[in-house]
Every structure is written in structure tokens, then in C-alpha cells.
Amino acid sequence: MTGDAKDIDAMNAAEAEKALADLAQRLARANAAYHGADAPEITDADYDALKRRNTAIEARFPSLKRKDSPSDQVGAAPSDGFGKIPHEVRMLSLGNAFDAGDVRDFDARIRRYLNLSDDAPLAYTAEPKIDGLSLSIRYENGQLIHAATRGDGAVGEDVTANVRTIAQVPETILGAPDLLEVRGEVYMSHADFAALNERQIKAGDKVFANPRNAAAGSLRQLDASITAARPLCFFAYAWGSLSEPLADTQSGALDRLAALGFSTNPVTRRCDGPDALLDRYDAIAAARAELGYDIDGVVYKVDDLALQARLGFRSTTPRWAIAHKFPAETAWTRLLGIDIQVGRTGALSPVARLQPVTVGGVVVSNATLHNEDYIAGRGSDGQPIRGGADLRIGDRVEVYRAGDVIPKIRDVDLSARPDDAIPYVFPKVCPDCGSAALREPGESVRRCTGGLICPAQRVARLKHLAGRSALDIDGLGDKEVERFHDLGWVRAPADIYDLQARHGSGLQTVANLEGWGETSARKLFAAIESARAQPLAKVLFALGIRHLGEVGGRDLARHFSTWGALARTVDAAAPAAAAHRAAEEAVAADRLTAEAEGRRARVTETRAAIWQDTDPAARAAWEEITGIDGIGATLALALCDAMAAPQERAAIDALIAALDISAPEAPLAESPVAGKTVVFTGSLEKMTRAEAKATAEGLGAKVSGSVSAKTDLLVAGPGAGSKAAKAAQLGVETIDEDAWLALIGSP
Ligand code: IVH
């Protein structure tokens, strides 16, 4: 690459100027290719050689150094191949239904939430679930402005140039709202997929495994002319930001999108109630093979958009829609072995190693075996599964996969069991660190007790921490975490953040690793730096504390706002956590005898006695944590345990010190209940409890399950009992349901 370059010492100024211009251009192009494309254009070594040559020419001709000199760009934040586009309205996924029972439950849940009787009319749409990738396209005044992939739901990739090449996506639309974000699925038809793979084979390029991968690979091309040569299609089925509603119903909105020039799915129907949905599901399943494109189920949506708005969302899925998936694909193969993986909370998870087999177009060689009872032929309720048959190495097993989920084992063929197959003995010590692996009473999972001394737990926690849904450190994927851990460079979370500093010239140390180079190292350190700024909720989730998921992280962050406030309260609650545990253990030990003796009251007495000896400040702190709606004693205990274990606490404190943590977004300033703690009690008549809670939270209120001195408002319906009395005693303002609705300005 640099072999034809002229000797620098022999250059005159004009030649040097030209060479610098040329190098700036080549390096910029290499950067762009590196950051976005799956295959960089030049090797790291060639890149470094170009950089060195640039520096040498500049050293000889300092006055010719360019304003955009590549040597000034060392350590600059890398621009990704695709720009990022934040979604004003989050792009969510859907909950799943697998059988008629799940669909009826979905309908029943909605009726409960909306307080509708079983026979009240409730219409849905039934739409094929297109197996492609979702896209959001923004139009302003009828002009296509940009298009973004779903990304993590909050921020997507800017694929505008590529989307402009899709024939079914109009560039201009007439008579649309001033602002319209159209959402739908990009997919590739079976015919186009087959033709594309044929062309790929002829050109000696890679063959795509299925139409979905082909569509994704084509949309995520840095060169839009490649996308243009790959026929992609688009079905519109939803929307994001809008300046005015499209219609009153989902079906009406689809009609409106069609009238604006978008392709909408012709198989979609409006259905009255779950029976009609199930009939439609059967009809779509029967027609599946003739559609000419892949679908993996049917999506049901509440048709009335006003009801959709009332139903709202859970953390990542709407309450008003569900995906009814087609049954899993299955295949028979041999169980070659059982490996044990140790997870971040120490859980020992058995994984089946299988003779590779194709299940629904995908080669499967591993499947989850859940836990030791599952291998032994018992379900989580202790009842026999697979007719009680255990799984042995060498067995012929039936594997299945439904959608994207991890393959599982459905059945075993005992007639094909080898004579020498022996029952599997689940390990009682951690295969990674040798610590005891224990099973708590009532738990199906066996856990390694090694904590942070267990390398497997450490690595799993680091992977979780750096992962997309936690601190999202680009370039620090599972492979890299394992490598840095094995090298001894990253053992605890905070090590990530001083990796560069600790190694003197950390950049060079990483750049010198095989498979790395200066560019990738630079890119990694820039990503680490930009991952210092984190919202509190993400940090809490990233800690990988048992029972503390994304929703728990958000609830805690909303309540405490800062790490300091949370840590102080958790520390203060430690004695109460210990008392709680002691009380529960004493109660468990005592319960059987007490109950046998007909002395139920003794259980309550035991609990009260232990509790009474606990410092009131500790009790108040414990009650504050467990009073947060959604945070129960199990999570509170896990949190207190993690913060009280010295080694673990040191690791947490070091991480917190390395981060720049932001408080949760301020609630809607104009809401009269923003920032207030509200408790609902008694029976509500105009809305269900779940709806009341979701609305209040949407307006920035904190909803608590119990009344305390911190409660700002009690909303009491008929039949309110002890909570109303406590509120009166504490002087907490109490209002009825109508006053609440008037307060929040609800019609
Ligand atoms: S509605 C808020 N409708 O399925 C709900 N999604 O598993 C937005 N999908 O991410 C989704 N066909 O990529 C909807 N008719 C359809 C769909 C559909 C395919 C995809 C979409 C979504 C995923 C959820």
C-alpha cells in the first residue's frame, strides 16, 4: 500500500502538500469503512503505516500541516458508520402468546384493565407478523426527512440513504399530517431472496441464511448503491411522532397509511373478540406458505386508539398488542454432552451439546437444559415432565425453537437410548472455582457460593455490565471481556474505566494485541470514555445484583434520584434487612409446629418480636425501600446483601467513583402531581388500580403501596380502611377518585 510512495527526504514542498492531501483522504476513507462496514478496507498495520508516513512528512514540512490533519485526530471520538437517530417515541417490541389460552388471557387482561365486562364488544386487528426488521421513517410536510432502524428502541441507526432506494417507500406524500413518522417492517420476498443468493454464489460472495438476514444485511450497507441493487420491500403497520392523529382506530390508521401511498398488509382483518382472532390465526397459518414472504405469527392490536392510549405500555411492550407466534419448529438429534455454565449470580445452567441439526432453517448445536430437575425429568412444580424420563448423554432428543428464543429440548426417545447410558449427576461444586454449589430450599437453581472469587461469575458480571441494555460499551463485547479478564487487565468493573491509564500507554498495549490495532484500540477507549456518563437506572441494572432488573433499577432511580441517597438508605437499612431475614427464618422453622398446634398467631408474634428489637431508623429505611411500588422484600434483601458484602461493596464504590451518574429525567413539569408520592386505596370505579398507577407514573408521580410520612396524597375509593386511617393520623391529604381525575385533568 505504501510501497510506491516517494522517499520523504527527496520530496519538494509541492509533492509534500499533495502527499498530505492524499493521505488525509485515504485515512478518512479508511476510518469511515472501519467504523461502519463489517469488513474494513485496509488492515490495521497498513492504516498505522499511512499514519506514520503522514507524521513524518509533517515533521519535515511543518508549515504544510493541514487543518484536518489525521495526526490531530488521535483519540478523537470515532464517528460510527451510521449516524444515530434518537426515537422521539420509543420503538418497542411485543409480548408473545403461544396458544389459545394465552390469547384469551390477553383479552381478559385488557378487559380487567379497562373494567370491561366479558361480553362488552372489543375489536382487534389481526395482522401478519412480518419477519423482517423494523424501521421508522420521518416525514415533515410530506417530505421524507430521515429513516432509522429500531436500534435499542431509544436510538436507532440512520439508514436514510438506503431507505430512499426502497421502491415501496415514497419520497413525497400528499395530504399527510405535517409531522408523520411511519413505522413498519423491511423484508425481502422469497423470490428476491432466492435470486439474490444466486447472484451472490455467482459472484463468489457470501450466501444469506434466510430472507430476514438478507434484508438486514442489505439495509445495513454503508454504500447505498448496494442496497439499491437488493430488492427490499416495506409494510407500514404503526407510527411514532405525529402532528395530528391518523384515525380513531388501528384499522382506520392502516387505511389512511395506504391512502398516503404506503404498502399495508392485505391479509390484515378487524376481528371482534378472541374467538374471531383465533379463527383468523388459523386462516393466516394455512395461507402462510403461499404469501411469498416470511411471517412468524399474527399480531393482535386493540382497534380503538383511545383504548390503546388508556392501556399504554409496560416497560418494553404495549398492553394493547401481542404477537401470537406460530408453533416452534422441531427436529430429532443426539445429546452429545452436558456443559455447565456459571452465570453472573452464580447460577449453574446446564447446556446440551447436540449433534448439529437444522431446525426451521437454522443449524442448532446447543440447547438450554434449564436446571438439574429438568434433566432429571421434573418440572418446576415437582411434577414429572416428558413422562418422567430423565436425559442422558447419548440419548436421542427432540429439539425445538420458537422464534428467536434459545433452542430447548422437548422430548426423549427412550427406545433409542444406548445400553451404556448412565443417569447424569449434576455437579455439587462450581466447575469453575470449586466452591460449593448450593440449592436453597424451594429453589430449582443450584448456585456457586464463590461470589467474586469465582472467575466465571466475575466474567459474566462484566459481560452484563458492558452489555447493550446496561452500560452499553461499544467494542467491549463478550469476547473482549473474556480476553481482558484472562489477561488480568479487567477483573472488576472499575478496571474498565482505568484500563488506559493503568497501562501507561494503555492504547498501545491494547493495540498490540493480536487482532487489534491502533484504530480499534482508539475506538474502544473513546467508547469507554463516553460510557462514563450514565443514568442512575442503568447503573443500578448494570451492577448485576440478583433480582435487580431493568424495571427495578428504574423504580429505585425514580425514588432516590441519586446514588448517594440510595446508598445511604440501603446502608441504614442493613440491620433491618438482617432482622427481616432472621424473622423469616424463625417463622419458617416455627410455622409447621405452630400451625400444627393451631397457633397461627405465634407466627405473627415471632415476626413482631424480632422486628421490635430493631433500631427504628433502620426499620424506617427498610420500610422506605420496600414501600416503593414494585420493590419487594426479596429485591431489598439482595440489594442490602450486595452493599454489605465488603469485597462486593468495594467493587461497587470503585465503579460509582469512575462514573458520571445522572438523575432520572425530571417528570413533566406542568403535571400537578409530578414528583409527588401517591397511594391508591379502596375500590376505584372509573379506572382499575393498574390503570391509575400507570397514569400517575406517566405524570411523574411516584406510586407507593403504603402510607407513610413521605406520602403526599392518598386517593381513597369506597372501602378504604387502615390506609385512610393512617393518612388521617399523619395528616396526609386524602381525596376521592373524582377529585383525583379532576386534579390530573382527565375527562
Ligand atoms: S407492532 C409497539 N405489527 O415484530 C408495537 N410489529 O416482536 C410495535 N412486527 O419490533 C410493533 N409485524 O419488528 C407490529 N404487524 C406488525 C408487525 C410487527 C412484524 C415486528 C416488529 C416488532 C416485532 C415485535
Image (tube, rainbow, N blue to C red):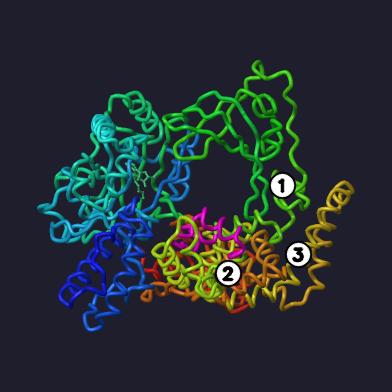
In the rendered structure, which amino acid carries the disc numbered 3?
His
Say which of marks 3 and 2 sits in front: 2
Cα–Cα span, label 3 and label 2? 35 Å
Label located before the other in sequence (3 or 1): 1
Vertical placement of residue 270 versus 161, above or below: above
Classify residue 350 as left or right of residue 556: right
Q: Position of residue 265 (x, y in %)?
A: 25, 37
Please report the bounds of the magenta region as a residue range.
Answer: 465-490
Given residues 512 and 527, the one toward you in this image is 512
Q: Where on the picture, by quarter, is residue 622?
A: bottom right
Mark 3 element type:
helix
- The reply to whether the residue tagged 1 has its Cβ within 8 angstroms of ligand 1 is no
Residue at image mark 3: 580
Vertical placement of residue 295 versus 419, above or below: below
In the rendered structure, which amino acid carries the disc numbered 1?
Pro
Mark 1 element type:
loop
Is residue 712 at all visible to an observer of this figure? no
Vertical placement of residue 597 versus 651, above or below: above
Given residues 68 and 650, the one toward you in this image is 68
Q: Where on the picture, by quarter, is residue 372?
A: top right
Residue at image mark 2: 495
Q: Are marks 3 and 2 in contact (CB under 8 Å)?
A: no
Given residues 503 and 642, the one toward you in this image is 503
Cα–Cα span, label 3 and label 1? 33 Å
Classify residue 212 as left or right of residue 394: left
